[in-house]
Image (cartoon, grey):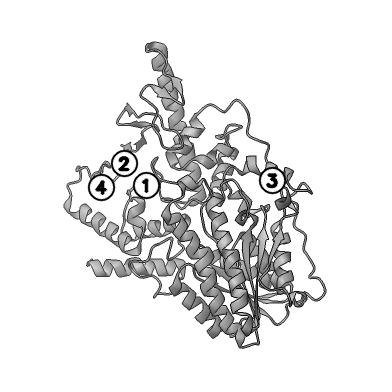
Amino acid sequence: MQAQDLLEHVRSVFVRMTRYPDEVVVPDADLEQDLGIDSVKRGEILATLRADFGLSDALKATPDELRTVARVSDFLSRTLTARSDVAPWADVAGGGWHANGHAEPAGQVGGHAEPAGQVGGHAEPARHANGHAEPAGRASGHAAPASGPAASNGAASAAAAAGEALRAVVEALADATRHPAELLVPDARLEEDLGIDRRRRDEVRALLRQRGALPDGLAGALDEARTVGDLARLLGAPPPAQAAAARAPAAPAAQRATPAPGASLAGKTILVTGSSRGLGRAIAAKLGRAGARVVVNSFHSRDDGDAVADEIRGAGGDAVHVWGSVANPAHVDKLFEAIARDVGELHHFVSNASNGRFGPLEQTTPEHWELAFRTNVIGYHQCALRAARLMERHGGGRIVALSSNGSSRYLEHFGAMGAVKAAVESLTRALAVELAPRNVQVNCVSAGPIYGHVTSNYPDHERILPYWESRTPGGRLCTEEDVADAVLLLLSDGARMINGATLTVDGGGSLCI
């Protein structure tokens, strides 16, 4: 097969399995940033390509080889060439090469995985979750025991425990993400290489609990792991002396709210970006129940977006789903072209799509800043301008952005996102003034920590959640439904003279934090 034919086949698989428009799946499209293909879908596509070409499930591919459509094609080209030209017994890219020409994942020989922390039978230095190696003969700050039979038995037991921990982690990751085995190597970074976000991490945590592989007191510590190996080392370590802080109580059951008098949005078409899950999903459902025709928007999962639109229609509402990333200018163009062409009108816009990193500022990279600003600020700005043009055709409209009370005060792990959300609030005030001549009002909802998807993605949330609750006058945080109610309020006729405002919805928590 010629290189161009191979590339076209790869593109066709991506188009078929994602249902994306053909013109979007270009060779240099980044699978995650441009196409929103998460770790699960990436694994499914790779499995399909392996089956198409009769390649072994054990074939090793690095995350970098799966970064763009063209790189996936190049990886397949090299693999197919190797099968034709390389002797069956040759060692290729550090993996064992079977007589059938299929590579085995590095770190495995004859189908048996090496214990975590060992390569070729030699123990590697122990590493903390922060990636720093311990001095030789020392692990977790404790001196190595004396040599001799007892020490040998202890080392063997430790190696066996490490191997069991690694196997438990890999099995849980494989079940939660459906990633191919070759991706789940100890050095693979959970977020950057495997696309495992906080929600997926919670699924892994739940699986480990169900299988009895997660000792009491280590659930919160898993949030600190950056790689597959980090997770394995945490599971293989003895549990801490003190258990982690008690888990936060479950979110109060969300009640099906009845729109307040005057809050009806019948006849209004409203775009809600980032509405395939979490808070965006709750907002979309709320607006659908209030009578609006909702334009659901997703990026990382087209299936999730379809599901939200189906749920709204199933509840008697009206909804359509339009895929695209607000951080990608080409996607924004197509998003609003689709609304103008297929929906025909737009009355209001809710800027909910968000992306960014929770964690210490010392660990925040320029890439993290760029992605956060492109989504939260630039994406909001570009969508607001495009939405205002469509609103003008109907005499005006409303725009509501989502922010956080971390924009004006310190919240642990929220330094970068706080700065980004402060920019969102500043942009809201400027847009309110400049779009007023078009009769477009622009406001912002600043939410505190809320139960649900957002909080479950937060680092060390099992410790921090009870603290936030203790600092809130009523002793409980808001729900996604509470925030959705505030959005509904700002879109209603009763808010016609509210413009350029930031409405705080946090149960009074910002008064005490």
Asked whether disc 3 touches disc 1, contact meaning CB atoms under 8 Å apart, the reply is: no
* Near-viewer residue (156 or 407): 407
Along the polypeptide, which appears first: circle 1 or circle 4?
Answer: 4
Measure the C-alpha gap from mark 3 to mark 1: 40 Å
Quick one: SS at disc 4? loop
In the displayed structure, would residue 317 be above or below residue 112?
Answer: below
The numbered dot on residue 45 is none
Label 2 crowding class (10 Å Cα cut-off): few <14, some 14-19, many 20+? many
Say which of marks 3 and 4 sits in front: 3
Q: Is residue 103 left or right of residue 223?
A: left
What amino acid is at disc 1?
A: Glu
- Identify the residue at the far right of this view: 261
Q: CA distance from mark 1 to mark 4?
A: 18 Å
Tell me the element at label 1. Answer: helix
| Crowding at mark 4 (Cα within 10 Å: few <14, some 14-19, many 20+) | few
Under mark 2, the amino acid is Ala
500 over 42 or under it: above or below: below
Query: Which is more N-terminal, label 1 or label 3?
Result: 1
Closest to the camera, between mark 3 and mark 2, is: 3
Q: Are marks 4 and 2 in contact (CB under 8 Å)?
A: no
Residue labelled with disc 3? 468
Q: Which mark is residue 106?
A: 2
